[in-house]
Amino acid sequence: MNHLQVTFDRTSYSLLPEQNVVKELFAPIQDQCQFQELIDKVQSVIIKIDPCSLGAQSNLIDRCVVLDPSLFINAGTHEGKCRLLEVLLFELENLAQTEAFNSLCSRAAQLDPNQFVEEFERLEFLSGQKTQAIIRDRFPQEEWRNFRFAYLPSHFIDYYLMQQILEHSQFLWEQHMYGKGAYLPTVSLPSDEEIKAYVLEYLRLASEAKDPVLSIATEAQKQLDQYRHDIKILKDHSESIGRVWERIQDVESARSKYI
């Protein structure tokens, strides 16, 4: 059984307690076959604990994963450990795709911003799917609610729409394609945070309704039908809910072209 070689950047914010937490995280999944495959690809990683606006980020050149100190605030709790574990798994899966990310970046000049961002999001979606596979294989279903990646959408379009609404796709454009043309989101993005929350909840339920686990899909579909029914009734009595309904219609139209 292989073990991931983890070292810590000495210039980082990192303190001994945080290092110990990271080293202990992989114990529950150490012998899991898909995790062993991930270790074979990555082999070693440098962990840097420093402020990071995204919470976590992988540096493909330095083979480094940056973790924001905020991830350790609740690391003493079971839920906090689950969150930290899935974030690390996802970033390691990104590192395992270094060749694919480098290939995409080398072709950036031949792609328009929308093509580049969508391909980048597709690679991260694949990392998310592999993270989900490890979590669902190792942890019982009653534990899945502790992991955001356990409920990653089954369809890329749902994932992509979420990333657009969360402004992650815009961030990718700014980081890699700024000055090379405008990035045009698939749907009109809500600027109001409350409307954004409503639309994200709709997307969450819509994606879970397509989950391959029947019990999850069935319950999500019930909630989705009720959610849509309630908003449809309220839209004529509230201007803000009316705007939510318009955004949901946009999302449904975008999803219908792919699902």
Image (tube, helix red, strand yellow):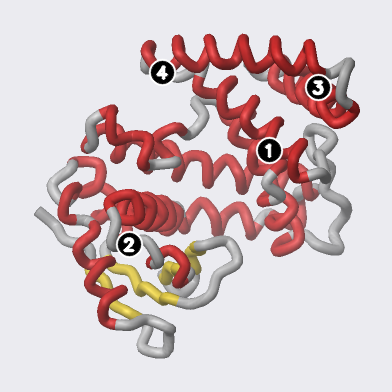
Q: Mark 2 or mark 4, which is nearer the start of the sequence?
A: 2
* Residue on which disc 4 sits: 216
Residue type (three-letter) at the residue carrying disc 1: Ala
Q: CA distance from mark 3 to mark 1?
A: 13 Å
Q: Is residue 231 visible?
A: yes
Few, some or many residues within 10 Å of mark 1 (<14, 14–19, 20+): some
Q: Is residue 60 visible?
A: no
Return the mark for residue 245: 3
Q: SS at mark 1?
A: helix
Q: Mark 1 or mark 3, which is nearer the start of the sequence?
A: 1
Do the residues under discs 3 and 1 have CB atoms within 8 angstroms? no
In the rendered structure, the answer to whether residue 65 lies left or right of residue 205 reads left
Q: CA distance from mark 1 to mark 2?
A: 26 Å
Residue type (three-letter) at the residue carrying disc 2: Ala
Q: CA distance from mark 4 to mark 2?
A: 28 Å
From this view, report whether residue 70 is shown above or below residue 201: below
Residue type (three-letter) at the residue carrying disc 3: Trp
Q: CA distance from mark 1 to mark 4?
A: 21 Å
Q: Mark 4 or mark 3, which is nearer the start of the sequence?
A: 4
Q: Position of residue 50 (x, y in %)?
A: 48, 77
* Residue in view at x 77 percent, y 36 percent: 195
